[in-house]
Image: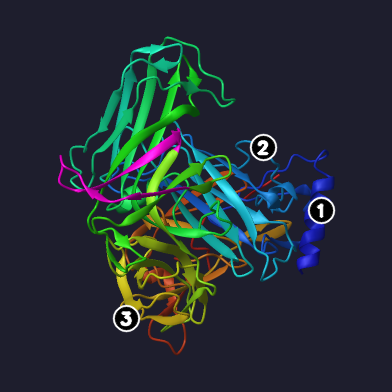
Amino acid sequence: MHNLIYNIILNQRKMVNRFFITLFIFIALIPFACRKPFDGVNAIVSNSYISYRVSGQIIDANSTATNPYPANTTVTVSGDAVDKGLIYNESGQQILTGSNNITVVSNSFSLVVKPYYVISSNNPLKLNLSIQAPGYLSVSKDLTISNTDSLQYLTIKILNTSKIPIGVALNNTSVAGIVNGTTTTPTNITVTNNAGGNTIPATQILIPANTAFKDANGNIIASNAPMNLSVISFSGNSTDAISSVPGGLNNVSTSIGSNSTFTLGAAVEINASIGGTVIKQLSQPIICKLILDSNTLNPITHTTIKLGDSIETWSNDAITNTWKKEGSSIIYRDPYSFKMATNISVTHFSTWMTAYSSNICSNPFIVKYTSTDSSISTMFINIVSQTGNKQVLDSKKVSVKNGDIIQFSLPQGIDFTVNMYASSYPNGTPVASNNFTACSNSTTLNYIVPSNRPSLYFDLQTYCTNGVFRYTGPIDYKVSGTNIWQTFTPSNNGTLTTTLLDWDVTYDFRIIYKGAEYRRSKQVLQSEFRQTTGTNNSWYYWGKDPANKQTFFSSPTACN
């Protein structure tokens, strides 16, 4: 069947100059335009030949944002797998190397690995995602697709500079006294707490006199114009702040040759320009004082930080998304705030941080998921350090069924807690919480489906006079009237069984398919389902017509 489907798709591409093809699909939720190349074929068309998918959603890093979805986001994917032609979109088009090469629809995107390409167990595909949106800080995120990632979900958070979350502080300022691109007097810049952020420490920058500012080529910017300076401070005691640090902190590339996970003390991003020319290099270091939270974990001593402790200094190369080790500094008591602090020597403008690096455990931590029924459920698994400020070490949103396993790459030397929630986010219903020593191998987490929640079976397909379409892939849903899309049970060749819906509740559903968003709203009425013989709470959708079975997502059908 897979070969038949693949040959049909190849034939369709050859005929693209002769046929204007439109395909409107929403897993039988939306209009379907049957294509003339299928006349007389009566084929069952599906995209189930795709073995590895990534479904991404871009949201505001501020967890209290009224509108969680940034406007006009763009995504660029790069890496060796793109250069080798292994990354495609779901339309079957190869994603080419270049800027903004991913289609973003309603803050969502998807990419797939070339059909029939097999990822070996010891050689995963490694990619980098660059996300941008007007008014937001750019974000780079590393992405790994392993042989076990048949469907991977990403939630990428980006920072709105006008509505910053607790844990982040911003100072945009103009620095005068620049002569031929050089300071004439010492300059102090302070980033203070924002209105609601008692977890946000102040950051102070001292620019010495006679500091010359240089462009990317190392040339002094010969201008007398004021310097436009932007300084953003990130607290190590705020989940929103930690998730917003450019470059990321979990299982990321470093200059020391191996991936690391960082326990953050504090971070600062510095951007500046003179007369429209971006400053990249400095003739001499500037000093940046970072206030640290006293609950920061020192994974070397396995306690919270103490006065006199040494903490590492790192800078981020935004082009390669690599953290470069710049040395270390000593923690002291700030005489003005009486809080713990450290001074770092900044030699160029980028993102800098004080943080403890931990190598990744040699073996992944494996979570075996078990459940009281056979349906697929959406779970959010959050892994945090047991002590200190309980920083998130890794997290995943997954669609899992009984017996599935989920793998995590965790840092050495940090004892951790695994939390599982019945939701797409860590604000759902808690399911399990267990403690483990560093580099533990595995655990089993069990989900008991609430007895009052039905198990619903759907057979989703769209009929045309010359064929049938059955969708395979991710689906989003939410209770009608709410803001955040969550992950529904994915469809596998047009079928799914789910325990995520409640009787008499109206839900919105959507898929992102072939560069378009398709939505439907539907109330789950028990009268439209039939109980499966011999079960108490298992149902399949029938519809309102007692004589003819209908589709849950009814819609008109159009064939050209």
Among numbered discs 1 and 2, the one appearing first in the sequence: 1
| Residue type, label 1 | Leu
Q: Is residue 329 magenta?
A: yes
Tell me the distance, in whole angstroms, between the alpha carbons under discs 3 and 2.
Answer: 51 Å
Q: Residues within 10 Å of mark 3 (few under 14, many from 20)?
A: few
In the rendered image, which residue does mark 3 sit on? Answer: 451
Contact between labelled residues 2 and 1, with CB atoms less than 8 Å apart: no
Q: Which residues are magenta?
A: 326-350
Residue 39 versus residue 168 in the image, above or below: below
In the rendered image, which residue does mark 1 sit on? Answer: 10
Q: Would you say 89 lies left or right of 293 here?
A: right
| Residue type, label 3 | Ser
Q: Residues within 10 Å of mark 2 (few under 14, many from 20)?
A: few
| Residue type, label 2 | Gly
Residue 504 percent location from the top left of the image: 32, 65
User: What is the quadrant of the C terminus in the image?
Assistant: top right
In the rendered image, which residue does mark 2 sit on? Answer: 98
Q: Residue at x 62, y 47 (%)?
A: 514
